[in-house]
Image (spheres, rainbow, N blue to C red):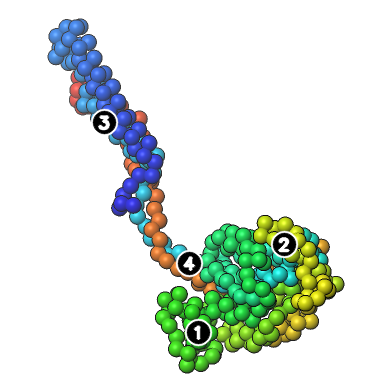
């Protein structure tokens, strides 16, 4: 945007048209009067007879009216000048870690565990206005989407995923490690070398010690919220919870499923149900259960059992999770200087109004001197 511009160009064009039209109208009017005087008789003599009318005042009134209308029309075009504003985004950073292992296909909650966690994630994201969110989808491996304020982009990613898209197994520890590295890739941790390189931090030597509290002050809260049924096939999740706590990250767990459990369905590439999952080398069906005991143990390592929430199949309420995250400190997530327009219409509207007011108050009669009036 230039130093001075008009937002509504149609009024700018209207101002130009009005000035031209009014100038033509007044020119024609003055010409008509002069021709009328010439038809009545000797023009100078007629003008002397009508000397009480000031032609100069009439011309001045015409000029004032045209200028007043032009300035008012220009004010309607919304003149603007350049301005600057420091924009700040305040909030917390949150990683949503969603379990996409095969056990999440179980239907002990309606319509399935994976659908329940997606619905819960949607509800949470709708509450994170102003916060940045990253996504980790995990099974036997973990894939991630970096921190962003575009929550709809994160929703598109996990809503398009399915357990068949990830490797078999359930590695909660890997999900926590990935989430920790997304939130604190600046911390001296060799585990996060691959993520730090992606963020421009360069490679990290293998000799870098494990995570330690960083020297800089954490200016805003960071948290990982894990949706899972708790069936961990790798067993190093507790160590990752402790590492996250060392770098100032709060970890919360949301249990999805029921203790009663259910069989694990299997589907073909077209999504058609093909049967139930069997134990290797056996004809027995595999059942999966919500392992609340394991999740509560992880919650204790993260700070207490209040770090665990149950996704009730009758209707999961995210308010408890939101309340827990609300206790975290908000800080500046991003700031930048933005160019914003500053309205300047008042500098045209006020003079235009004053010119019209003066024109209305100004008469077209000539003022005679007192001596002439007595005579």
The reply to whether the C-beta atoms of the residues labelled 4 and 1 are less than 8 Å apart is no
Badge number at residue 88: 4
Q: Nearer the viewer, mark 4 or mark 3?
A: 4
Looking at marks 1 and 2 on the same chain, the residue that comes earlier in the sequence is marked by 1
Report the residue at 71% width, 65% height from top: 114
Mark 2 or mark 3: which is in front? 2
Q: Is mark 4 on a helix, strand or loop?
A: strand
Q: Residue 301's quadrant in the figure?
A: bottom right
Q: Is residue 210 left or right of residue 64?
A: right
- Of helix, strand and loop, which one carries label 2? strand
Camera-side residue of 169 and 178: 169
Q: Give how far across and how far down residue 155 sits, in percent.
A: 60, 61
Q: How far apart are marks 2 and 3 (CA)?
A: 84 Å
Q: Is residue 75 above or below residue 194?
A: above
| Disc 4 from disc 3: Cα separation | 49 Å
Q: Provide residue 39's location: percent of width, then percent of height.
A: 19, 7
In the figure, is residue 329 to the left or right of 83?
right
Circle 4 Cα neighbour tier, 10 Å, few/some/many (<14 / 14–19 / ≥20) = few
Residue 314, x across and y down, in percent: 81, 63
Residue at the disc numbered 3? 63
**In which quadrant of the rendered view does residue 340 lie?**
bottom left
Residue nearer the viewer, 276 or 357: 276
Disc number for residue 267: 2
> Residue tagged by mark 1?
187
Q: Which of marks 4 and 1 is in front?
A: 1
Gap between marks 1 and 2, in whole Å? 42 Å
Give residue 110's position: percent from left, percent from top. 79, 61
């Amino acid at each position: 945007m230039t130093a001075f511009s008009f937002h509504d160009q149609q009024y700018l064009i209207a101002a130009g048209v009005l000035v031209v039209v009014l100038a033509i109208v007044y020119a024609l009017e003055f010409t008509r009067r002069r021709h009328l005087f010439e038809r009545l008789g000797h023009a100078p003599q007629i003008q002397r007879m009508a000397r009480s009318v000031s032609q100069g005042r009439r011309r001045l009134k015409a000029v004032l009216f045209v200028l007043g209308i032009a300035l008012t029309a220009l004010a309607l075009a919304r003149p603007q000048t350049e301005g600057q504003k420091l924009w700040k985004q305040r909030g917390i950073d949150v990683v949503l870690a969603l379990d996409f292992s095969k056990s999440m296909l179980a239907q002990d909650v309606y319509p399935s565990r994976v659908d329940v966690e997606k619905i819960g994630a949607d509800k949470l994201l709708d509450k994170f206005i102003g916060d940045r969110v990253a996504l980790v989808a995990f099974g036997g491996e973990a894939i991630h989407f970096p921190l962003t304020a575009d929550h709809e982009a994160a929703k598109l990613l996990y809503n398009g995923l399915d357990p068949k898209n990830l490797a078999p197994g359930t590695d909660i520890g890997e999900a926590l490690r990935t989430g920790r590295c997304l939130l604190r890739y600046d911390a001296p941790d060799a585990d996060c070398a691959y993520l730090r390189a992606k963020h421009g931090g360069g490679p990290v030597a293998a000799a870098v010690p494990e995570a330690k509290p960083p020297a800089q002050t954490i200016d805003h809260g960071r948290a990982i919220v894990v949706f899972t049924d708790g069936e961990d096939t790798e067993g190093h999740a507790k160590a990752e919870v402790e590492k996250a706590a060392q770098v100032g990250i709060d970890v919360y767990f949301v249990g999805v499923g029921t203790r009663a459990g259910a069989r694990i369905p299997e589907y073909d590439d077209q999504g058609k149900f093909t049967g139930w999952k069997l134990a290797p080398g056996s004809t027995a069906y595999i059942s999966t259960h919500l392992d609340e005991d394991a999740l509560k143990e992880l919650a204790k390592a993260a700070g207490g059992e209040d770090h665990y929430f149950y996704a009730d199949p009758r209707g999961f309420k995210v308010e408890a999770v939101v309340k827990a995250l609300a206790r975290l400190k908000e800080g500046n997530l991003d700031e930048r200087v933005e160019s914003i327009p500053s309205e300047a219409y008042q500098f045209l509207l006020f003079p235009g109004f004053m010119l019209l007011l003066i024109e209305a108050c100004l008469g077209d009669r000539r003022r005679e001197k007192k001596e002439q009036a007595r005579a």
